Amino acid sequence: MSDTSPTNPLRAGMRMQRTPEPCTVVIFGATGDLTHRKLVPALYNLQRERLLPPGFSVVGFARRDWSDDFFRDSLLKDAKEFSRSGIDPNLWGSFAEGMSYIQASFDDPAGYAALAVRLRELDEQRGASGNRLFYLSTPPESYATIIQQLGAAGLARSPGNGWTRIIIEKPFGRDLTSARALNAEVHNVFDEQQVYRIDHYLGKETVQNILVFRFANGIFEPLWDRRYVDHVQITVAETVGLEGRGGYYEHAGAMRDMVQNHLMQLLTLTAMEPPIGYRADAVRDEKVKVLRAIRPMPPEQVDQHTVRGQYGPGTVAGQAVPGYREEPGVAADSMTETYVALRFFIDNWRWAGVPFLLRTGKRLPKRVSEIAIQFRSAPLMLFDDGPLSDIEPNVLAMQVQPDEGITLRFDSKVPGQANQIRPVTMDFRYNAAFGVESPEAYERLLLDAMLGDSTLFTRSDEVEASWSLITPIHQGWAQDAPPPFPNYEAGTWGPKAADMLLGKEWRSWRRL
Amino acid sequence: MTNILTATPLGAPTPIDARSIERELNALWQETTDNKSPDQRHQVSRTRVLNLIVVTRSAAAAERATEVAAKLTLRHPHRAIVVNALPQDPGDSLEAWVQAHCLLPIHGRPRVCGEQITIVARGPAVERVPNTLLPLLVPDVPVMLWWMAGAPFDDLRFAKFGDLIDRVVVDSATFDAPETTLAKMAALTAQGTRISDLSWSRLTPWRELAAQFFDAPAQVPHLYELTSVTVDYEAQVAPGDRSQALLLVGWLAARLGWQVAAPLTSDRGNSTVQLKRTDGSLVQVTLRPAPMQDDALDRLAMLTLTSPQATFSVARDPAPDCAMTRAEVAGMSPLERRVRLEQLDEAGLLSEELRLLGQDITYAGAVRMAAALLGATE
């Protein structure tokens, strides 16, 4: 142990988590919903768990004319409602002391000059040592402006030995061109190591558990390839409709809103090779390799590999609900897709010929996200005279939400004289084995960003590789004849046409 | 909610019949499941991630153990085997019965149930308990022993459990003479016994808060230049039980490589001990009794670390479950903040301990130094 070692000797071997160095979080768009409902409650809970450093501060930056006090009061009001642990007024008081607000429009250099002054004061008064985390919680149109202004104000680099990092919310671009343009803007000002592109799906415990399940166990990985796997189904189903997001969703659609980010994350984590270490770049290198190995769809073949849907009126949970085109903020002849099913092939040694079937949609019967590995059938029917298809193939399903768990389906003999066979499941429920309440995704991600761990964030090449698969699909759709929207009833599992993606008569979409 | 199904007296000289107990547990689970409406039925899950053997010395303690086991179900679904050992009681009998703890379902979650076997051993039958337990353990998951019957060191029955268990949990704050057991605890950990002391677990938030001052690299040098450490501990009479304060100082000393220079002395209630840093300079450690605030077993009041350029302190706050931390560093304005310092109950502490499977090396180092501070070893 050297006397000059900068590491904290009291942390060694301790049963508690590492906490970040003193720092300041600057939230752009601090008056918005995300800040009030997610970010600040997440930060408060981190503070409550003693995971935030002394001298931790929050600076809100937004257009509205709010005072420091109004900002704190407004955050407190929502934190009371949205914090998973409630609010202890004694702790909140101390937490709120470190909060302040800067009123400025995002393109006003004076606002950034004021921010620079505030940050210097915090460095001196609260010992933040020049450590800063910028959080872009604004509409995506403002990202480029804020990044340019931060650069112009000299805020992209920290004084002394401090660090400066920036978290960028989704959506990151709306196609390959805009994503590349935004990456170029970001890299004009920040190094890639400073950039944390957030996809809150990666903050979920069960998503992280995919890698633990695959790579901390010895028995699954040998089966995880084309020799044993028939196909993979990834489902992210929502029961909700638009929830007032009509204006945004009309221009996004299910492909941009869900597939490009969440489903592609689940796909890459499921299909990636073992990384050489659990480190940010090692993990992300493998994810990018999967994306690059996915067979691109030429626009003229898109209709063979994708199915779009849009819900009409129907019933969800016993309630009559309107169709998509009747939702507020939606055009009466809208052609926006609220459902997508698609088939990808990953052209590498592990997965050649194995279809990856993805589907997501709004107003489906059940809220469920899962990854199902469908194994090949037994090679021949040994029992009785029934056809082989009487035996259900084995399925390993990883449920991501809401009932996080892992289920293995296998066949078993029905008790009795005959060799009757029926599938049974072996269930592992995450919250039955670990009753502890999981932290919110944003807690984990904010903490990781403060600690400088970017494993659970998207790298620039990853986001571009993902768009380079999605953009040709949009181009193909634009060339095709418009589908007969609405083509599924709210409260059903989407358009029947999705069955054609299965490719083989024995395959079917999972009944969830 | 505890659902006691049956009591099965098992007769003195006959061995406990593990199969009949398993059958009863299965029946109990069946009943737990059958009582539900059809759509809830699949939601009762029988998961057991560990065996928890609890040894008590009275019916009241056995009841408390049952309550704690029920609370633990949510975080660590387990099979609890509560052994109420009454060697002084007349007779020679082993009685056992099974029960299930089901937690009221939390919205959107499956109902979680735990199972418990309670054994009452009277007279000489107490000696037969360890072997009786063997067939009752759930296979392939860890076996934890929570020894609620005071200090276990001189108890031969404790030694008999040795090969059976993966980890033993004690609470030295409830021992008759906690300070004198520090050396015995140190000896046990040195032999490789995996021990959890709940008294040590109570220090976790204190250690976290102390460590946090030094997460900023700029503050680390102050840690190597500490000249004094003061711990205020709550005591009924001076000097009272200083074991928690000694463990906390023991931890700092072990982490920072300090050695005892002059052993502990007491003067007007205050205890002092001199330690030597790795660079040869001295650190003055003072343990000061403070008035009792409550009868909670968490007995620390304040920790102060001083170096020539800085003072860091953590102090219990009048606001419930809170502490104030304060850092005064030369050239910077003092920084104070209120943080959570929860007082965990037995279930909460145990729940933290049951997460650990391996040897707690940090504890081993801390308890060894704590004993050394008393001059008990080295």
Image: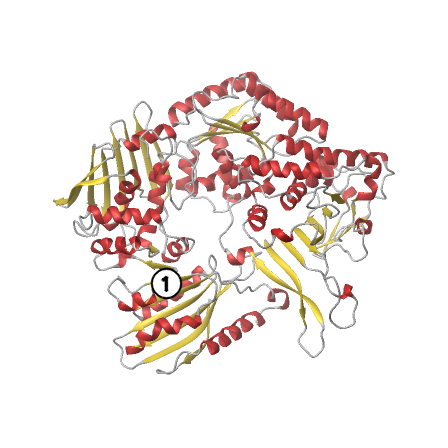
The chain identifier of the residue carrying mark 1 reads B
A80 or A254, which lies in front? Answer: A254
Colour approach in the figure: secondary structure
- Count of labels in the image: 1
Q: Residue at x 58, y 41 (%)?
A: A275
Residue A34 appears in the picture as rendered = yes
Name the residue nearer the viewer: A501 or A492. Answer: A501
Determine which residue is flagged by label 1. B145
How crowded pointer 1 is (Cα within 10 Å; few <14, some 14-19, many 20+) is rated as: many
Q: Percent from the top left, x then y, of residue B322?
A: 35, 43
**Above or below for A146 versus A365:** above
Where residue A60 appears, as percent x and y from the top left, is: 51, 29
Residue A181 in the figure: left or right of residue B52: right
Instruction: Measuring from the top left, give residue A307's x and y in whole percent.
Output: 80, 45
Residue at x 22% of width, y 60% of height: B176
Q: Residue at x 48, y 63 (%)?
A: B140
Kindly state the secondary structure of the residue where label 1 is placed: strand
Asked whether the viewer can see residue A339, the reply is no
Residue farthest to the right?
A481
Q: Is residue A471 above or below residue A492?
A: above
Whether residue A73 is situated above or below residue B377 in the rendered picture: above
Q: Residue B251: which quarter of the image?
A: top left
What amino acid type is highlighted by mark number 1?
A: Leu
Residue in the foreground of this view, choosing between A381 and A236: A381
Q: Position of residue A8 (x, y in %)?
A: 36, 35
